[in-house]
Image: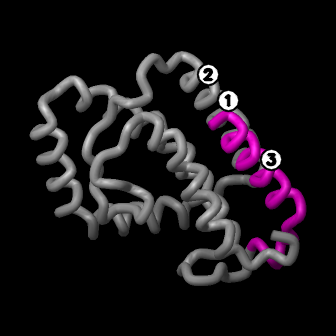
Amino acid sequence: MHDELERARATFHELLALATENELRSRSAGTRWTNRQLLFHMLLGFLIMRALLALARGFSRLPRGFGRGFARVLNAGTRPFDVANYLGSWLGGTFLPLHTMDVLCDRTIARLHRRLDRERDLSRGMHYPTRWDPFFQDFMTLGDLYRFPVRHFDFHRRQLTLTRA
């Protein structure tokens, strides 16, 4: 898992460094975002990990029915989530300086490395809203969650229309 996180971190830096301003403003393939906005969305997959891991740790202590019910409620709120996800990535990708995105990537992945090193039981988990993201499974362990942002990153990397992506 550490190697996967490091590969994504290095790739993110390379993508930002090699992309031209025109490429960053260009549309990505298969999304309504520009390449720059999509790059922020790819980073967002790592940024939300703190919340996802906290939810899993908390719900893993409760009877499974609580987590299953929570996931159903979240699935019912898919439309508002999609709007917030789109707008958040649009705003972050439009206004956040590239240098800040670079620094956020480093800090966030460094925190994930440290958290992963401290984990005692990667088999704990909870039910997740499967309609929110194609990589969310009905039940995700902490181990699954640590793999999520890299899978999300790799998927969206193929949608970038950067010459050297």
Q: What is the x, y in percent for residue 34?
A: 65, 75
* Residue at image coords 46%, 66%: 87
Residues tagged 1 and 3 counted as in contact (Cβ below 8 A): no
Magenta residues, dominant SS class: helix
Tag 1: amino acid: Ala
* Left or right position of 110 against 70: right
Q: Is 7 included in the stretch rendered in magenta?
A: yes
Q: Amino acid at mark 3?
A: Ala
The answer to whether the residue labelled 2 contacts the one labelled 1, judged by CB atoms less than 8 Å apart, is: yes
Can you tell which mark lies on residue 114? 2
* Residue type at the position of mark 2: Arg
Q: Residue at x 53, y 51 (%)?
A: 45
Residue 111 appears in which quarter of the rendering?
Answer: top right
Q: Which mark is residue 10?
A: 3
Inter-mark Cα distance, 2 to 3: 17 Å
Vertically, is 4 above or below 130? above
Answer few, some or many: residues within 10 Å of disc 2's Cα (few below 14, many 20 plus, some between 14 and 19). Answer: few
Label 1 belongs to which residue?
Answer: 110
Q: Quadrant of residue 3?
A: top right
Which range of residues does the magenta coloring cover?
1-24
Q: Residues within 10 Å of mark 1 (few under 14, many from 20)?
A: some
Q: If the image is split into quadrants, where does the N terminus sit?
A: top right
C-alpha separation, residue under disc 2 versus residue under disc 1: 6 Å
Q: Earlier in the sequence, mark 2 or mark 3?
A: 3
